[in-house]
Amino acid sequence: MQKLTNVGENLVNDIASRYGLSYGAVTHMLVAVNNGGGSMAQFNCPELGGSGQWMRGGMTMVGDMFNNGLKTTVDNLCNELANILSNNQIFPVIPAGTPGSNQWWPSNLGSPFSSGAQNNIRYAVFPNRLAVELNGQVSVYDTLDHNIGGVSQQQGNNTSLTFNSQWGTINVSSLPLITGQPLPVVANTNFADVAAPAMNNMPTNNNLSNNNLNNNNGLNSSANNSSSQQQSTNGNLDNNYSANTNGINNDNNSHNKQPIDQKDQKSITQTLDIIEKLAQLHEMGALTDDEYNTKKSDLLSRI
């Protein structure tokens, strides 16, 4: 817990009572506003909707983004805390170069050309050095040949920092540590690696093409089989038709060769038998309507 002066404790207790917040929540917001120089704050307070940001005279962002009442509460609270910080000695005087001080980095580093704070992490950039304070512990890194242009905190994480240089985005944990404890290494999720197994299991264009070819071959084989069966059926019908027609012709020839005196006795019976056979062929589809009717009429004319 951050130590406060007697004046600071009294002010925090009064604010906590008026806003209906705990002493710890107000102290957390007080430290966040102080780290932002009294003009901004980045906080993570469960009593105020979790993670959020505040900028004096600007926007206020809270976890419950559509809760305008909560935004107003955070804005009023931060403005009041900024005012008491500028007019009162809230924190005990801490020697420069010690954790908890506004000049918390080692004094031998001199003055930073850039500094800032995000949640519970503070950082300061020096020539060839980067100082980071996490929960009161100060670590100093060698920035090598990087020209640091900005430091940012990884989204959704309170212990990971990255910075931008001429070589792109670099994780602070990848720098050589000179003094202090290293920041916890947070594994970055590579969505390409996660997606790769699923992509490998997906059918490729070649597989799709082969499947289509196999399906087409199957369809062609089925079509060929159906065609062969149809041809066989037609052939059988044609053979049946030829056989029956030949039988009819043979009967006609035999009929023509018979003596005249037998014609009257057999002609009617034979003709009716032939017509019956023709009717069967017609029902089987071997004879068309025209063919059947023509033959039938011809045979009936002979009776």
Image: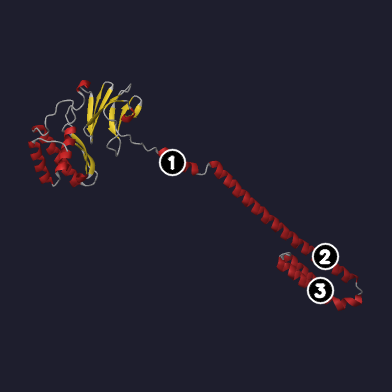
Decide which of tag 3 and tag 1 comes sooner along the chain. 1
Count residues near mark 1 (Cα–Cα under 10 Å), then give few for <14, some for 14-19, many for 20+. Answer: few
| Figure check: 122 above or below 206 | above
Secondary element at image label 2:
helix
Q: Which mark is residue 195?
A: 1
**Amino acid tagged 2:** Asn
At horizontal 21% and vertical 20% (from top left) the residue drawn is 108
Q: Which mark is residue 23?
A: none
In the image, is 161 to the left or to the right of 108?
A: right
- The single residue placed furthest to the bottom in the displayed view is 265
Decide which of tag 2 and tag 1 comes sooner along the chain. 1
C-alpha gap between disc 3 and disc 1 = 83 Å
Q: Which residue is mark 2?
A: 246
Count residues near mark 3 (Cα–Cα under 10 Å), then give few for <14, some for 14-19, many for 20+. Answer: many
Labels 2, 1: front one: 1
**Amino acid tagged 1:** Ala
Count residues near mark 2 (Cα–Cα under 10 Å), then give few for <14, some for 14-19, many for 20+. Answer: few
Please say if the residues under marks 2 and 1 sit with CB atoms less than 8 Å apart: no
Decide which of tag 2 and tag 3 comes sooner along the chain. 2
Please say if the residues under marks 3 and 1 sit with CB atoms less than 8 Å apart: no
Q: Quarter-wise, where is residue 51 in the image?
A: top left
Q: Which mark is residue 271?
A: 3
C-alpha gap between disc 2 and disc 1 = 75 Å
| Figure check: 285 above or below 302 | above
